């Protein structure tokens, strides 16, 4: 039995020495150190030996087992360090190399334009209307009737406005002006608000027009508000938005909900008023419409026009962004072309 133990020990140590992986070690442990191993079976047979041989061979069997265990532990450590070195060698990182740039998202140019315009007017004391005062799905009353539009006004035709199938008088708003009515119904003067949002019109899509675009509506209602207040407010906005004081002109116009009404032009950004393709050789670019709130509109929401007056204005966000950044096609804002968007 002693000779058998010596042979087992020699064989086990040789296999341990030749082991190259954790799998090899596990196989050796199962063969020589587990409960069903050869060595354990020999230990079970010690009971059949004579009393004088049993302690001698038992001690030798334990010595062999300990020798194999120590050899296994050492080999396991060697294999671990070897595999670790190989892993470090294959997965090493050169910390002197520049890091990988992960592109981050940025606000859309229209979002940035809206935020910029809102910030300018907030600096003048305007507040942004609540969402319930600026719904995109409107009734004909808020989009037209309450704004002093005649019943037969051409803007009400389906060729100009998107009506829904929900009800005959429910539509996608064609202007943000309805926010004026919602606000004046819910709040008493003095008022100084702006309302940004999307609007929809039945337009043929082209470089200058789209059937979805963005507007920002402004409204001021207070005592003794004059057209001079309107001019001062919009001239200051023009200076802050374009980064410098630019010549403006107010042209007589007509909007059902303001009287008098005007369209405001700014000196052409491209040619400085000399005349070019962008301004059709006029030297001017239209940026918004405005006027003094019509007394009929005030009366319709229960505000006495003998006590309060006010002005309103509306501007197209896409138009202002195109003018400021020299963009010649409104469709670029909606095509999601990364080459265009990453410039902002």
Image (cartoon, rainbow, N blue to C red):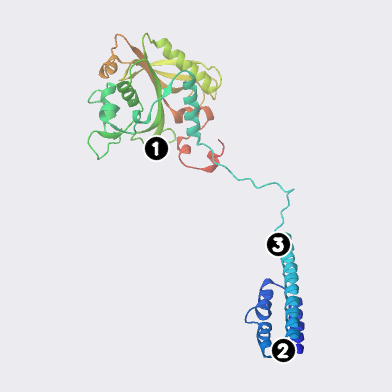
Residue displayed at 77% across by 89% down: 3
Q: Quadrant of the N terminus?
A: bottom right
Q: How many marks?
A: 3
State how far apart marks 3 and 1 are (Cα): 60 Å
State how far apart marks 2 and 1 are (Cα): 107 Å
Residue 108 locus on image (x, y percent)? 50, 36
Residue 315 locus on image (x, y percent)? 42, 25
Q: Nearer the viewer, residue 144 or 62?
A: 62
> Quick one: SS at disc 3?
helix
Residue 260 locus on image (x, y percent)? 34, 14
State how far apart marks 2 and 3 are (Cα): 54 Å
On residue 51, the disc is 2
The residue at which mark 3 appears reads as 87
Residue 34 locus on image (x, y percent)? 64, 78
On residue 221, the disc is none
The residue at which mark 1 appears reads as 205
């Amino acid at each position: 039995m002693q000779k058998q133990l010596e042979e087992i020990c020699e064989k086990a140590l040789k296999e341990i020495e030749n082991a190259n992986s954790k799998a090899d070690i596990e196989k050796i442990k199962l063969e020589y150190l587990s409960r069903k191993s050869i060595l354990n079976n020999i230990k079970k047979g010690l009971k059949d030996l004579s009393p004088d041989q049993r302690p001698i061979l038992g001690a030798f069997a334990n010595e062999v087992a300990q020798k194999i265990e120590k050899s296994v532990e050492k080999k396991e450590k060697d294999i671990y360090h070897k595999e670790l070195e190989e892993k470090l060698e294959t997965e090493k990182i050169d910390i002197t190399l520049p890091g990988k740039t992960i592109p981050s998202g940025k606000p859309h140019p229209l979002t940035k334009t809206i935020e910029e315009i809102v910030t300018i007017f907030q600096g003048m004391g305007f507040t942004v209307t609540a969402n319930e005062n600026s719904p995109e799905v409107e009734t004909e009353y808020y989009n037209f009737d309450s704004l002093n539009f005649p019943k037969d006004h051409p803007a009400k035709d389906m060729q100009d406005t998107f009506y829904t199938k929900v009800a005959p008088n429910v539509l996608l708003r064609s202007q943000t002006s309805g926010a004026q009515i919602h606000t004046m119904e819910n709040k008493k003067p003095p008022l100084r608000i702006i309302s940004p949002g999307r609007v929809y019109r039945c337009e043929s899509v082209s470089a200058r027009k789209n059937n979805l675009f963005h507007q920002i509506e402004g409204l001021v209602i207070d005592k003794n508000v004059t057209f001079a207040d309107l001019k001062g407010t919009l001239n200051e906005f023009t200076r802050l938005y374009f980064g410098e004081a630019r010549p403006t002109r107010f042209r007589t116009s007509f909007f059902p909900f303001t009287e008098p009404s005007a369209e405001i032009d700014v000196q052409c950004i491209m040619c400085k008023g000399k005349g070019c393709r962008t301004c059709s050789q006029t030297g001017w670019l239209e940026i918004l419409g405005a006027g003094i709130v019509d007394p009929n509109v005030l009366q319709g929401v229960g505000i006495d026009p003998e006590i309060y007056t006010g002005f309103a204005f509306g501007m197209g966000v896409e138009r202002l962004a195109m003018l400021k950044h020299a963009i010649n096609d409104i469709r670029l804002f909606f095509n999601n072309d990364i080459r265009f968007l990453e410039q902002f």
